[in-house]
Image: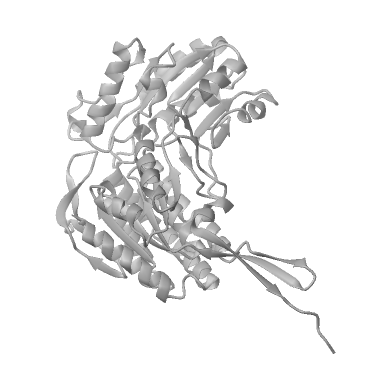
């Protein structure tokens, strides 16, 4: 039995064991799987200083080929150590192995995509009038502060870090304590790439938010990227406004499935189930709202209920597990409270689910069985607020216009799904939905090569795709007169 890992911070190319030593917990068992150091604010300041020095003093911001090479090598490093990323996510994050494998597989792809972007400055030169040339060039803004959530910590770290590095920024990454072991593994993989100068990437783990606040407030950090809750995103945007920082926010969601009478039920039902249970519903694109046309409402209602009731919850180490735990027992209590309140407010129970207390093998973990409630009132909090657990609501609609109105009656606009075998309807409906990602006859069907982000309260800016570098680049216009040559 190997010693339990002790996760440290990675700053200026060195491991630092600063801050109180705390336990990392496996959410499937409640067991201690390792230890981590909980960063005090002073550690975050060290990381900011290291990133600022690397930005000023290393060739990183000026050498696009170095950046492209480093990002390509980093992609190779993550590809060759994917099994370690998967194992760590299973143990610390509670994801079942297929979900952890999917998360880990996105990382090399995202890095390869931006390694090409690094070489392309998107500048241009024009002859603005005879004898004058104007050029627009793009420069890295400086230190990027990246605040990462616990729900898909490995990929969501790289999703923000990759474009920041491609742009020529240096970075301070704030990882949450629930992903401390993942943070240390990511730092170790990053450390293995010699083309990355010391201090270009700095990774700090903290349980609170004081270090994150310092990142948002620091005059040395001109760009902040945050993935997490809408409430925290709003607070970050308010704080960043004082310094006119650029802020990228990927926030909450309340993804609707719009299921029309002509949908292929055999294709719909397994995906509806997965959209509720992937990472136990702790995903910004969880398919939490099932909007179904009256003609197939009975078939969807009974088919989905049957499937959700049959889901086997359990730890990642058991291959029979179809859904892992919530991140901790506090999350179980929080989700159950929301469900209880909804039932009290008139939601009809189709599948009660709830805390998995009947099975002694699961008692140590934070398991919550999938839950399905039918509602008629769109004003209920369960229809409007992100639950962040394996809970779906079902609502019946009559017309296409009703479906679109119901789907858009939300503060959120991260993603939506349209199910129909009509040749025209999916694209017609998709164009009217207020959301950043529309999946047609599928769910959360995103490509890392394309822009990802939210409408309305689901965020600001885009990660993925060509737009991912925007938050990290500044424009500069340089104009020069060149006079006619005299003989």
**Residue 467 against residue 336 in the figure, above or below:** below
Q: Quadrant of the C terminus?
A: bottom right
The answer to which quarter of the image holds residue 307 is: top left
Q: Determine whether, in the image, residue 465 is placed left or right of residue 153.
A: right
Q: Residue furthest bottom?
A: 487
Q: Residue at x 45, y 14 (%)?
A: 301
**x then y, percent, for residue 7:** 23, 58
Residue 240 in picture, x, y percent from top left: 39, 49
Farthest-out residue, right: 487
On the image, the x and y values in percent for residue 146 come to 38, 54
Locate residue 175 relative to residue 301 in the image: left or right. left
On the picture, is 54 further left or further right than 335?
right
Query: Which of 206/270 is in front?
Result: 206
Residue in the foreground of this view, choosing between 397 and 453 = 453
Here the colouring is one colour
What residue sits 63% from the left and 26% below the top?
Answer: 429
Q: Residue at x 53, y 41 (%)?
A: 446
User: Hey, which quadrant is residue 204 in on the image?
Assistant: bottom left
Give the answer, above or below, for where 295 lies relative to 181. Answer: above
Q: Quadrant of the N terminus?
A: bottom left
Task: In this rendered view, identify the residue nearer to me: 286 or 436.
Answer: 436
Is 148 left, or right, of 207 in this rendering?
A: right
Residue 414 location (% of width, % of height): 49, 35
């Amino acid at each position: 039995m190997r010693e339990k890992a002790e996760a440290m911070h990675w700053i200026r190319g060195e491991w630092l064991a600063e801050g109180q030593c705390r336990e990392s917990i496996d959410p499937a068992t409640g067991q201690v799987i390792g230890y981590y150091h909980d960063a005090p604010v002073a550690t975050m300041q060290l990381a900011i200083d290291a990133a600022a020095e690397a930005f000023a003093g290393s060739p990183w911001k000026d050498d696009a080929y170095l950046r492209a090479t480093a990002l390509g090598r980093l992609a190779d490093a993550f590809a060759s150590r994917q099994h370690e990323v998967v194992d760590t996510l299973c143990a610390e994050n509670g994801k079942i192995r297929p979900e952890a494998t999917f998360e880990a597989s996105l990382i090399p792809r995202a890095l390869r995509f931006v390694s090409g972007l690094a070489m392309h400055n998107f500048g241009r030169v024009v002859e603005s009038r005879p004898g004058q040339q104007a050029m627009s060039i793009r420069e890295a803004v400086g230190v990027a502060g990246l605040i990462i959530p616990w729900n898909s910590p490995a990929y969501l770290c790289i999703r923000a870090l990759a474009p920041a590095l491609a742009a020529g920024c240096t970075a301070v990454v704030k990882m949450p304590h629930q992903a401390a072991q993942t943070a240390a593994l990511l730092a170790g993989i990053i450390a293995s790439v010699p083309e990355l100068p010391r201090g270009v990437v700095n990774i700090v783990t903290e349980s609170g938010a004081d270090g994150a606040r310092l990142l948002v407030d620091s005059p040395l950090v001109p760009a902040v990227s945050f993935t997490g809750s809408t409430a925290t995103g709003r607070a970050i945007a308010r704080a960043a406004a004082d310094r006119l920082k650029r802020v990228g926010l990927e926030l909450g969601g309340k993804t609707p499935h719009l299921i029309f009478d002509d949908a292929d039920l055999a294709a719909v039902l397994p995906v509806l189930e997965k959209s509720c249970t992937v990472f136990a519903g702790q995903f910004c694109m969880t398919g939490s709202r099932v909007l179904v046309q009256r003609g197939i409402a009975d078939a969807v209602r009974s088919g989905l209920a049957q499937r959700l009731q049959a889901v086997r919850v359990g730890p990642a180490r058991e291959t029979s597990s179809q859904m892992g735990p919530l991140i901790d027992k506090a999350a179980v209590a929080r989700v159950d409270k929301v469900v209880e309140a909804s039932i009290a407010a008139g939601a009809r129970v189709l599948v009660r689910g709830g805390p998995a207390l009947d099975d002694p093998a699961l008692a140590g973990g934070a398991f919550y069985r999938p839950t399905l409630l039918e509602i008629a009132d769109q004003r209920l909090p369960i229809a409007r607020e992100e639950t962040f657990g394996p809970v779906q609501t079902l609502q019946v609609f009559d017309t296409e216009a009703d479906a679109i109105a119901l789907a858009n009656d939300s503060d959120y606009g991260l993603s939506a799904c349209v199910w129909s075998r009509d040749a025209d309807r999916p694209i017609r409906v998709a164009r009217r939905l207020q959301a950043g990602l529309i999946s047609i006859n599928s769910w959360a069907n995103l490509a890392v090569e394309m822009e990802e982000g939210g409408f309305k309260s689901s965020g600001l800016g885009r990660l993925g795709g060509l737009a991912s570098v925007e938050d990290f680049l500044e424009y500069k216009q340089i104009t020069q007169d060149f006079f006619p040559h005299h003989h």
